[in-house]
Image (cartoon, helix red, strand yellow):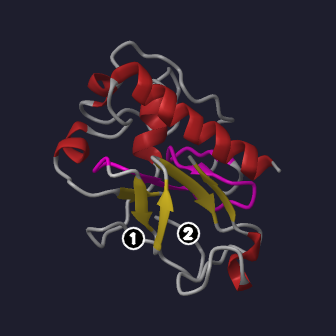
Amino acid sequence: MTAKVDAVNLATAMQTFRAEYGYWPVSEERARGTNRDFTFGTEGTSSACVVTNGSGREANNSEVVRILMANEAGAPGGNLPGQDLRNPRKILFLHAKTLGDNGRGGVGIDGVFRDPWGNPYIITLDLNGDGWCEGGGYRMKGAVSVWSFGRDKKANLKEARDVGVNKDNIHFDR
């Protein structure tokens, strides 16, 4: 239940940010440098599955989380160059538990937002504006998709989302 609530809150924070500023909470370089969707949140997983975005490289979700948390004093992971430009009014869009380590649910010292089992949340954003989130081996209708590998820390991208090892995975698409 906690993972589902986190996923809903994360998706809502991203959409609220977009409504406020007119762009997604991603670096200016990423926002301007792509004409396809982008997936965040896979770096550092202990899962049998590695999810990559369209460029074939991994990117953890800390970029998105740091922007949504408005670089507040003591925000985990510190600030990134140019990050203040993405949330110039420093509005706190995401209220998430911050931690002194990286192994549990919440935002770790590395700035990565993890589910209750320690898995980084995976975020796919519709950066090309076609109404679909494509990433992590799936295509979901909507502007944002948030999911986790669930209790077993596994996913199989060749199976449907809710069968086999994917049965316990948490998804929220909007």
The spot of residue 92 in percent (x, y) is 53, 20
SS type, badge 1: loop
In the image, residue 49 sits, relative to residue 63, either above or below, namely below
Residue that appears at 61% across and 58% down = 147
Q: Residues within 10 Å of mark 1 (few under 14, many from 20)?
A: many
The spot of residue 121 in percent (x, y) is 58, 55
Residue 128 sits inside the magenta stretch: yes
Q: Across the whole image, how many numbered discs are drawn on residues? A: 2
Please say whether residue 131 is visible from this viewpoint. yes
Instruction: Give the labeled residue for mark 2.
Output: 45
Relative depth, front residue between 162 and 38: 162
Query: Which amino acid, mark 2?
Result: Thr
- Which segment did they paint magenta? 106-129
Residue 114 numbered mark, or none:
none
Query: Which amino acid, mark 1?
Result: Thr
Residue furthest to the top in view is 89
Relative depth, front residue between 126 and 146: 126
Residue that appears at 53% across and 81% down = 157
Secondary structure mainly formed by the magenta segment: loop
The spot of residue 38 in percent (x, y) is 35, 57
Q: Residues within 10 Å of mark 2 (few under 14, many from 20)?
A: some
Q: Left or right: where does residue 63 sit relative to residue 48?
A: left
Please say whether residue 100 is visible from this viewpoint. no
Residue that appears at 65% across and 78% down = 154
CA distance separating discs 2 and 1: 12 Å
In the image, residue 152 sits, relative to residue 32, either above or below, namely below
SS type, badge 2: loop
Instruction: Give the labeled residue for mark 1.
Output: 52
Relative depth, front residue between 11 and 67: 11
